[in-house]
Amino acid sequence: MPKISIIIPCYFNEENIPITKERLLNNELLFDNDVTFEYVMVDDGSKDNTLAELIQFKNEQPNKVKVIQLAGNVGSYNAILAGMAYATGDCCVVIAADLQDPPELMVKMYEHWKNGIKLIVGNRADREESFFQKAFSNTYHKLIQKFALKNIPNGGFDYVFFDKQLKDEVVKINEKNTNTLYLLAWLNYDMVCIPYTRVKREVGKSRWTLQKKIKLFIDSFISFSYAPLKFISVTGILLGIAALLYSFFIIFMRLTGHIDTGGWSSLMVVILFVSSFQMIGLGIIGEYVWRNLEASRNRPVYVVEKVHE
C-alpha cells in the first residue's frame, strides 16, 4: 500500500490553509483506493494564525496530518528540509501552500513514479505573474542551467515528486544556504518534466521578497557552481594582458617622444577600475569562505519547537 507524503512549507498562510486543505483532500479522490496520504505541514515561524489553522487541520484529520512547528523563520527551503526529515511516505511531494501549483498534477507524477522514475518535476512552462517577476525568474533559471545544473528544465521548478531514496539522500546531506529542491536534481537521477502554467496567487500576500530572491540566486550559484571563481580568474588574466599591452604602448610612445610623463587622470582611472575589480573578487571569494565557515560550525539548519502528531 503506497504512501505519499505531501510536504508543505507555510509562512503567513492563515488565509490559504482552509482553502488548500479542502483542495488537497478532494485531490485524493483522483488516486487509486490503495494509496494513502500523509500531510507534513511545516510552520516556518509565522506570526499570524497559520499555526492555529494547521493545528485545526490536524484535529480534523488526526491520522493524516503532521504539523512541524519551527522555532523561527528559516526560509522555505530549510522548512522543506525539515518536512523531509519528518516525512515517512514511500514517495514525497513538495507543493506551495498558496495553490499556485495544481495538486491535480500529482496523479500524473504518481503514475511516473509507479513506472520507476524517482524524480518527477512540475516544470513551469508559463506563469501568471508580472513582467518583472517573470524576467527575474527566467534569468535566474537560465543562468543556473548554463553555469551550474545542466539538467534542470527551462523555467525551473518548485513543485516536485520524488522517491523516498532521494529524500533520504538530501536529508543526509543537510546542506546549508542552498536550494534544497535543486539538490534533488544534483543527485542526477533520471528525471521526468511535466509542464504546467503557474497561476496567479489569489489569496493572501506573498512573502517572497526581492531580498530573499537575491539570496537564493547567490546561494544557488555558490552551492552548485564555481563559475564566479572562474570569472575572477579569467577577468584577472584579461586585465593583466591589457595592463601589459598598455605598458608597452606607454613605453613606445615615451621613447618616440609622442607623450611626456604626465597622465594623472588616466592613471587614476586604471587604479580605480582595478581596485573595484579586486573588491568584487574579494566579495565573491568571501561568499564561498563564509559558507565554508557556516558548514564547519555544524549549527542546525532549523530548530523544531514542537511536533504536533
Image (cartoon, helix red, strand yellow):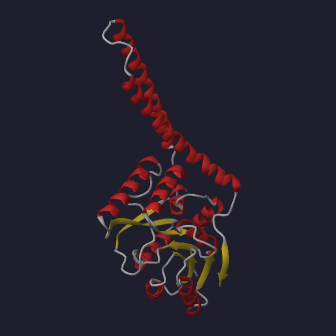
**Could one spot residue 96 in this view of the protein?**
yes
- At x 52%, y 60%, the residue is 179
- At x 57%, y 77%, the residue is 43
Q: Nearer the viewer, residue 192 or 53?
A: 53
- Left or right: where 293 falls relative to 98: right
User: Residue most toward the top?
Assistant: 256
- Left or right: where 246 falls relative to 181: left
- At x 60%, y 65%, the residue is 165
- Residue 80 place in picture, x, y as percent: 56, 69
From what the image shows, is residue 182 above or below residue 269?
A: below
- Residue 247 place in picture, x, y as percent: 41, 17
Q: Quadrant of residue 174?
A: bottom right
- At x 35%, y 63%, the residue is 133
- Left or right: where 179 falls relative to 252: right
From what the image shows, is residue 231 above or below residue 291?
A: above
- Residue 170 place in picture, x, y as percent: 60, 62
